[in-house]
Amino acid sequence: MIEIEEKRLASLIDITISEMVSEDEAKLFSYTKKINKLNIYTFLELAGDRDLTRSFWSSNSNDLTILGAGQATTIQAKGERFQSIENQWNELLRKAVIHNPFEKQGTGIVGLGGFAFDPKKESTPLWSNFPDGQLTIPEIMVTRIENQFYLTFNMYLRTDDHGFQLMEEYQEMESYLLEESSFFKKDVNMIEKKEVAPKQWMQTIQKATEEMKTSSTNKIVLAREVRLRFDERADIPSIIRKLIETQSNSYIFAYEIDGDCFVGATPERLVKVEGNQLFSTCLAGTAPRGKTTKEDQKIAEELYRDPKNRKEHDYVVQMIRKAVERYCTDVDIPSEPQVYMYKTLQHLYTPVTAKLMNSHSIFSIIEELHPTPALGGTPRKESMAFIRDNELLDRGWYGAPIGWLDSNNNGEFAVAIRSAMIQGTEASLFAGCGIVADSDPVSEYEETNIKLMPMLSVLGG
Ligand SMILES: C=C(O[C@H]1C=CC=C(C(=O)O)[C@@H]1O)C(=O)O
Ligand SMILES: [Mg+2]
């Protein structure tokens, strides 16, 4: 049985190669099959041991998990990143050969990746390995859809490749990564925690509120950084495991480039596309959780009625409505937000559903939506200029779209908040707040502390 499959795969590769016309032609070849249940953490651990670049995504309802190992190819962009990545993605697919009988979302050729928050902001060494936009098409990818597991091989074929040889290489990699061993990595200990210029951050908030009182700018999101140091290298699969165990209703993501790993558990969907169905989320306005159900309820009611938080939230709703209406029909957005509870905090939340017009892709929507006033501000141009000129932080990919898409118009991008950049024995954590004219710097500072909690707690803080 297995031999038949191996022969079939080798011959499919050879057929693809024989159809390539010129010597410098290259083609992406993709082959998907069903596999037994596997331990996702072991897979990631083993991929790391082999120095295979890892990509990870888990949806907020935990019904879809994508594990990537290695890079069949990557596409990258500088500056005007969305259009450039879209063009390269389409070009890649135009020449791709896909053997995927399942038609399940997130299987076959899938690009996982993200974008820089603001390519115009001067970059620091913290983000030097992360380009303005990148999608990775993993060599080996496992997709878990509810309790079904699929495995995809992606190969970037050239004319001098040989089917049998490649098939053997991939099968060897597969049996290595799917090995049934159990790991027990010791937790790292945090030996240093340093808040980067918190007083200055509060002064910047003061400056922003003053500017908002005298200009047409209504909202500016300002973020700050906390630096951690550990006694040994942080283990990425253990971090992912803890995020999954503690942060329900959040997207868990991890994306590695040259040993650096950007990881997080974000509650915020930017956009999800399933065929022509589009979903987005307005999430802004924050309060802590209570210690009892009664206290929780009281805080939720206060959040719901609080004018400052409602203002923060409404700017996001207005902007997302306008953006979605440009590219969609049947736009449905409730007129009042709900309060949604997460493990350590509560947010004002408004869901968005719509039908994406045929002529548009997920990239058009991402470009139109990013940054929403939950991460940038309003108006966009003025708030972005303020952030660029005044924020001490190099946001890199923090606050920007991160996610995946497949070759069948399915994909989802979240907003990369509640996140950290892990570099060996060090980490940078990020958190920001929507500042409006009546924001109080100390309250906003406290708000960032509760937003930092989930990442801090899994990193031993
Ligand atoms: C910028 C962040 O959160 C945004 C998303 C939800 C609520 C927010 C707020 O209430 O300020 C922020 O706009 C962050 O967590 O770093
Ligand atoms: Mg807020």
Image: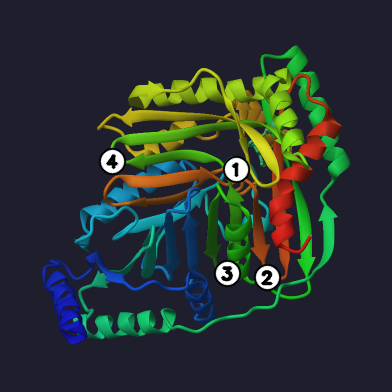
Whichever of labels 1 and 4 marks the residue nearer the N terminus, that label is: 4
Residue 339: horizontal and vertical position, in percent? 62, 30
Q: Nearer the viewer, residue 41 or 68?
A: 41
Taking the image as shown, residue 386 lies to the left or right of residue 102, namely right
Cα–Cα span, label 4 and label 3? 31 Å
Q: Residue 234 — which label?
A: 2
The residue that disc 4 covers is 275
Q: Nearer the viewer, residue 131 or 252?
A: 252
Looking at the picture, which amino acid does disc 4 mark? Gly
- Asked if ligand 1 lies within 8 A of label 1, the reply is yes
Cα–Cα span, label 1 and label 4? 26 Å
Residue 427: horizontal and vertical position, in percent? 71, 61
Cα–Cα span, label 1 and label 3? 22 Å
Mark nearest the camera among 1 and 3 is 3
The residue that disc 3 covers is 237
Mark nearest the camera among 4 and 2 is 4
SS label for mark 2: loop
Looking at the picture, which amino acid does disc 2 mark? Ala
Whichever of labels 1 and 2 marks the residue nearer the N terminus, that label is: 2
Looking at the picture, which amino acid does disc 3 mark? Pro
Q: On the rendered image, what quadrant is the C terminus found in? A: bottom right
Q: Residue 399 — which label?
A: 1
Query: Is residue 281 placed above or below 416 in the rendered structure?
Result: above
Q: Residues within 10 Å of mark 3 (few under 14, many from 20)?
A: many
Residue 62: horizontal and vertical position, in percent? 47, 53
Could you tell me which residue is drawn at 58 percent across and 65 percent down? 241
Query: Is residue 34 placed above or below 315 in the rendered structure?
Result: below
Tell me, yes or no, whether the two marked residues, 1 and 2, touch with CB atoms within 8 Å: no
